Amino acid sequence: MPNPTAAMLVIGDEILSGRTRDANMNHLAKELTSHGIALTEVRVVSDDAEAITKAVQALSAAYDHVFTSGGIGPTHDDITAENVARAFDRPISVRDDARAALQSHYDRQGLELNEARLRMARIPDGATLIDNPISAAPGFLIENVYVMAGVPSIFNAMLAGVLPTLTGGAPVLSQSLQVFRGEGDIAGPLGDLAARYPDLSIGSYPFQRDGVFGAQIVVRGQDGAQVDAAMAELNRTFPA
């Protein structure tokens, strides 16, 4: 059986403008890979209602799991929650358990749970809360879409709580070999190797170091014996 599939939707003008460098995609990819879930697509959309709704609908229909990042804070441009709700034609409102979590958090800090902060307690009908152990404002799961914060430390904490609830497949194993030859020299033998091992992913990632061209060849797959066999052939073809 193939591993479950996943997509990520990164939401925010600050990502598209280059003002903020996204770190959540890299973390999610590593965690899903180790859990046996294949991250197959990543999209980035602006803080635009229609773009968010359409992307959620498309990704939810195409993949087993969808993870969103960003746009669930207290400001006017945090519009993810209502547009994810719209994608599934669900009403959204302040929910008592989300309000209670925020109230407790801000009481401990001696701060007011004002109208802006209360926006973070808006949850679509029928959704399940995702715990936020850092700042209390919850994410939520609706259908197969996990709506999570954009702040990396909070995103990571939410994901840590979500992962144990997901059923993954076989972990993807990976080995690599560094070859100090240009890709034009290794392309033929590498293509032959890939043809002999169709169940493996064999990638070539070029670099230039101290004026010398080379490539990092990465072999990935679920069958450890096949990965070992392909690596043995690589080492024979490109001895150090």
Image (cartoon, grey):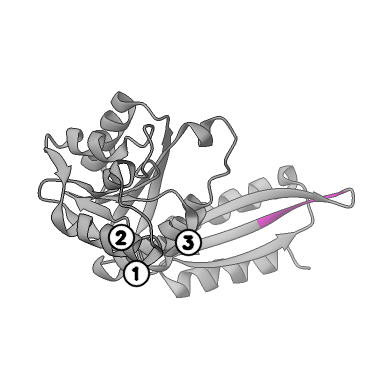
Camera-side residue: 232 or 66? 66
Quadrant of residue 236 in the image? bottom right
Task: Sort mark 3 into few (<14), some (14-19) or many (20+) by Cα contacts within 10 Å.
Answer: few
Residue 3's tag is: 2
170 above or below 196?
A: below
Residue 19 within the magenta-colored segment of the rendering: no
In three-dimensional space, the C-alpha distance between marks 2 and 3, rounded to whole angstroms, equals 15 Å
Q: Amino acid at mark 3?
A: Lys
23 vs 39, left or right, is: right
Residue under the point 57% across and 41% down: 20
Q: Nearer the viewer, residue 223 or 82?
A: 82
| Residue 112 or residue 58, whichever sits in front | 112
Do the CB atoms of the residues marked 2 and 3 lie less than 8 Å apart? Answer: no
Asked where in the image residue 108 lies, by quadrant, the reply is bottom left
Task: Give the overall secondary structure of the magenta segment.
Answer: strand
Residue 89 appears at what percent x and percent y?
A: 12, 34
The residues colored magenta run 212-216
Q: Quadrant of the N terminus?
A: bottom left
Question: Which of marks 1 and 3 precedes in the sequence?
Answer: 3
With 223 as the anchor, is 203 left or right in this view? right
Residue 170 - label: 1
Q: Reading the chain from its start, which is encountered first: label 2 or label 1? A: 2
Q: Position of residue 118 (x, y in %)?
A: 27, 46
Label 3 – label 1 distance at C-alpha: 14 Å
The residue at the point 29 percent across, 63 percent down is 131
Kind of residue at disc 2 = Asn
- Residue 32 lies, in percent from the top left, at 39, 61
For the point 59% across and 36% down, the residue is 19
Q: From the viewer's perspective, is residue 14 above or below residue 48?
A: below
* Image position of 215 with respect to 74: above or below: below
Residue 230 visible: yes
